Image: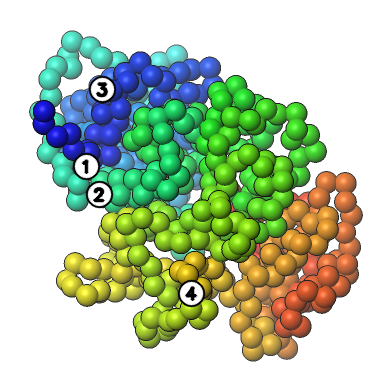
Amino acid sequence: MPIEFDPVLVHQWLERSASRNPDKPALIYGQSRRTYGQILSEVTALARSLIDLGIERGDRVAIMVGNRPQAVIAMYGVMKAGAVFVMVSDQLKGQKLAYILDNCQAQVLISHASRAQVVKEAMWLVNSRPQIIWVEAEGGQNPLKKGHRFEELVRESSIHQATDWPRVIDVDLACLIYTSGSTGQPKGIMSTHHNMVSAARSIIQYIGNEPDDVVLDVLPLSFDYGLYQVIMTFMFGGTVVLERSFVYLHEVLSRIAQHRVTGWPVVPTIVAMLLRLQDLGRYDLGSLRYMTNTGAALPTEHIARLRKLLPHVRIYSMFGLIECKRVWYLDPGQLDSRPGSVGKVMPNCEVFIVDQDGRQLGPGQVGQLVVRGANVMQGYWADQALTDRTFRPGSYPEDRRLFTGDLFKMDEDGYLYFVGRQDDMIKCKGERVSPKEVEDTLLQMPGVSEVAVIGVPDDVLGQAIKAFVIPMPGRQILPQEVTRFAVDHLEPFMVPKHVEIVSDLPRTPNGKVDKRQLAIR
């Protein structure tokens, strides 16, 4: 009997899961369910249609559909056609969409019909002229009177016979993920099939996913964390429950009981929202086996509160960057003994802590995190200068190491502790202050729900520390109370000079606190 080898391309994992369990639910969205066989059928039809439209190996196809099943079908169809998918947020404005389309020279834009006005604005600005495919165009009408209808392209017909699929190998690009662009224009992060499969396989391995797992995905598919939930689940043959967002938390929690969800990936914002709920006990969360966190380090105080609320759930505190997907995780069994740690490096990945000259540092010393492994991206699309600044050569010609810009320290057992980003560190009274350390301390104050800390210009201090504090529901906190708590628990140079009590914090589309918006409030 011949040996069965694992697939090497992202879409081949979908094909394998479909061949093994064609009738198993693969994707649940609202009241609709698609089996693996149905998904593969639509993916194959779309791939054929894209080739008929002139898409060739390596072409870029932008997808602006939001968290809908068509986005999943589109990305797999693009890869099966030999092209590169570019998943962009459906909240983009016309100017930024135009920049991305021109930057990656997209040949096709797949857009939801509800974004027609944004697409129209972008088309006035772009130099390229991508073909447009409309999803859910009402009444079969093209919003801009031109383009193609997605529903027609994924409908199997006698026209679509056997296709000679483009040859694709695992070092070919699979996708571009554009950063949020909070500083300057968005940057396209290039990942090959090998990068994506390697990262997903490592994460599946340490979480221990099985085909019976049902994963609730409430995070944007334009955010790598949300995107990989689909990729990983289709690899291990589970079921994805896809939600448009996590804004309506009561609906999200109801889905867990309805579909017997076993895995729930979250970001710190979702945890903060959960901890503010007064009636969490009314929801049946007994099916949950694990929760994972990334996007930003989960505060230790929030981990402790979450464990009390959900003692049966294994909580994986994780950390990573879009440039390498995931780097490390803290095994749930280590939460008590290593509070504050983001864990050890994941399988098939290696990290170093280095000083400004690139010399490796020892335990307890703070320095920049360097990552190497098959999960690390290829570089930034059309930006060789930034790629050269971010990567440095290793021990042999093809050994490139990613210099992350994140500051960490490592203990003697190899467990990592996040200190902050190099450009986020606050320089106060000649000292370097980690916003995260101040935030974690203030979160221990009774009645505090969330904290965000930034540096603001100060003529005397250089930078003064400013804390934005959200109280727990029904609690009132005065700024001077926060200051007194800080004086009792922090070194003098770390005590915030300014404290503002707020009801909410600005967020990026991925759910992170937008500190640049805080700085201009």
Residue on which the image places disc 4: 412
Q: Amino acid at mark 3?
A: Ser
Residue on which the image places disc 1: 8
Is the image coloured rainbow, by chain, by secondary structure, or in one colour? rainbow
The numbered mark, 2 or 1, whose residue comes first in the sequence reads 1
The label nearer to you, 2 versus 3, is: 3
| 298 versus 136 height, above or below | below
The answer for how far apart the CA atoms under marks 4 and 3 are is 47 Å
The answer for how far apart the CA atoms under marks 2 and 4 are is 32 Å
Check disc 4: other Cα within 10 Å, few if <14, some if 14-19, many if 20+: few
Q: Residue at x 40, y 24 (%)?
A: 26
Check disc 2: other Cα within 10 Å, few if <14, some if 14-19, many if 20+: many
Q: Amino acid at mark 2?
A: His
The numbered mark, 1 or 3, whose residue comes first in the sequence reads 1
x and y, in percent, of residue 384 in the image: 27, 67
The numbered mark, 1 or 4, whose residue comes first in the sequence reads 1
The answer for how far apart the CA atoms under marks 1 and 4 are is 36 Å
The answer for how far apart the CA atoms under marks 2 and 1 are is 7 Å
Tag 1 secondary structure: loop
In the figure, is residue 275 to the left or right of 32? right
In the figure, is residue 495 to the left or right of 399? right
Residue on which the image places disc 2: 194
